[in-house]
Each structure stands twice: as C-alpha cells, then as structure tokens.
Image (spheres, grey):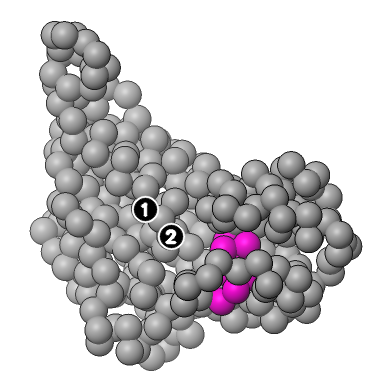
Amino acid sequence: MTNTPHIPVLYNEVIDSFASVERGIIIDCTLGYGGHTSLLLDTYPHLHVIGIDQDETAIEFSTARLAEYGDRVRIKKGRFSDVIKEILQEHNSDEIVGVLADIGVSSLQLDDESRGFSYDSNVLDMRMNKESSFDAKSVVNEYSQKDLENILYNYGELKNSRSLASAIISKRPFDSSKMLSEVVKPFAPRGKKIHPATLVFQAIRIEVNDELGELNRLLDALKENCLSRAKVGIISFHSLEDRVVKQKFTLWSKKCICDIDVMRCECGNNNDIGKIVTKKPLCATSDELKQNPRSRSAKLRVFQMSRSCSG
C-alpha cells in the first residue's frame, strides 16, 4: 500500500470477507486509487477484477498503478449503477463471484482543495464526477429555503435545518467551502466530536452526487440480475448509507415478504436469495484507526447470494 496516496479502509476485513471466493470476477464498484483491487489481486491470484469509477483522476492513476496485473483487471468509467448493468449483460451471472463498493469520498478527493470537499477549500464544488454540471455551488446558491431545509434534515439529519437554511440564504452567494463552513459553524450539534460543518457538507455532497440513489440502484441491479454466486460487500460511512444496506440485506434474506397483516403466507415463502454473512457490521480495528483515523466511521456489511432470483 506504500505506492498509493489513498489507504483503503477495512482492508483486512475486505480480504477476509472474500476468502471463500473461488476463481471468477469481482466487480469493484468504487475503484478509486486501486487500493482494494490491488489487495484482492495480490491475495487471490485466480481472481479478475473489473473496476468502476466516475472520477477521471482516479482512473488515470489506477490505470497506471494496476498495469502490472495485465488482463486480470479492466477499468470502466461511469456511475456504478449504470456501468454494473453493462457488466452484468456482458457476463454470465455465475462468472461474477464478488461485488465490492466503498461508498464515500476518497482521501485524495477530500485532500485536494480544488475539488471543494474540504472545509477549508477556496472553491465550492463536491462533484465526484468533474464532468457533471451540477455542483455544490448550485445547491447552496440556488436552492429555495424549503429545498435546503429538506436536504439538511434528510441527508444531514440536522434538527435545526430551518435555522441553518435561513442562515445560508442570508449570506448568499457563496463561492467557497471555507465560507460555507464558517457560516454554519455556530449551528453545529452539541456534543458531537466532529467538525462543526460535517453534517452540512455531508447533506450537500449527497445531494450533488445522488449518493443514496446510486446505492439503491446498485443494490437493486444486483438482485434483479440474479447473481447466484456473488458475495456482496458494501462499506458505508454514515448511518443513512448503512441503513439502506442493512434494510436491503434483511429483505434479501427473507423467505416470506407478505404484509405483516396477512394471516397466511401468500408469497410462496421462497423469496430469499441468500444469507447475511455479517450480523453486525465489521469496523476498523484499533491498529487501523491509528494508521488511518478516517476509517473510524467505516462499516462493512457482507451478503452471500446463493440462488437465482425472480426480479
């Protein structure tokens, strides 16, 4: 991992989670800087990886970094919810033995002030795909108070979303993340050991990149395309993402999906498509936390698909 500027989170847990996977293809839905992909290729020599990313900078870096693996790795550009459908059409379902998604912003995106993700950045951007025309400046400067309230409440889980939205509107226009950070600082939730602007930035970033929509579409695509052998590992970084993954995996493991008010099962009691591997999410060890403090909020949930599904 010394040849990459990005430390992949939960790297030991990811490797261990795919230990039972035999030869085949793993789809790395969030290739980033190739950290997880290179570890998987090094550890399991019979595996191939198809990596997906929408960030051209990440793709350029990983293309060079992963060149040594030759045809064991392919890289595709785009939103993973779209590209994975193409991949699943190109390959038989039993060829895909694993799917990994590290849902979140990479360290290099956070640290690169030109991307506008950091609290001290002199730009206001937050796009994971730099080719997109919709950015954080559009949200902060153009959204109505009601729309701002909604994303702050729903994506930042901020109870004071109304006063926050009002404060933002009163100081518009914004041209930097640094300015936004200063304005929202007095409204930070008390008692939380995080940067005062963390939840506001989280909410805006989710809106800009449609992160929850992407995650839901990915999980739906996996179920609909009947991946009967795949082990699915999803790493999330906040409660909203983790809740989506937990709920989907729980639904996938249910035999009966009838409404709770139904007296007798009418669905056939045969709707499960596998089993939950991690009853509780896997989190960073103390050693990893010392090496990479940003791993403190990472959670990995794993699901083993075991039979074809009906859609």
Q: Amino acid at mark 1?
A: Asp
Q: Is residue 72 left or right of residue 76?
A: left
Query: Picture coordinates of residue 112 (x, y %)?
Result: 64, 80
Query: Picture coordinates of residue 148 (x, y %)?
Result: 71, 49
**Foreground pick, 245 / 232:** 245
Q: The N terminus lies in which quarter of the figure?
A: bottom left
Q: Is residue 168 left or right of residue 104?
A: right
Rendered image: mark on residue 242:
1
Query: Picture coordinates of residue 236 (x, y %)?
Result: 39, 59
Queried whether the magenta region covers residue 140, the answer comes back as no
Which residue corresponds to the image point at 42% horizontal and 72% vertical from the top-left? 34
Q: Is residue 96 left or right of residue 219?
A: left
Query: Picture coordinates of residue 136 (x, y %)?
Result: 73, 59
Queried whether the magenta region covers residue 197, the answer comes back as yes
Report whether residue 177 is seen: no
Q: The C terminus lies in which quarter of the figure?
A: top left
Main SS of the magenta segment? helix
Rendered image: mark on residue 238:
2
Q: Which residues are magenta?
A: 195-202
Classify mark 2: residues with Cα within 10 Å, few (<14), some (14-19) or many (20+): some
Establish if 236 lies above or below 35: above
Q: Are marks 2 and 1 in contact (CB under 8 Å)?
A: yes
Q: Amino acid at mark 2?
A: His
Which residue corresponds to the image point at 24% horizontal and 59% vertical from the top-left? 281
Establish if 110 lies above or below 248: below
Cα separation between marks 2 and 1: 6 Å
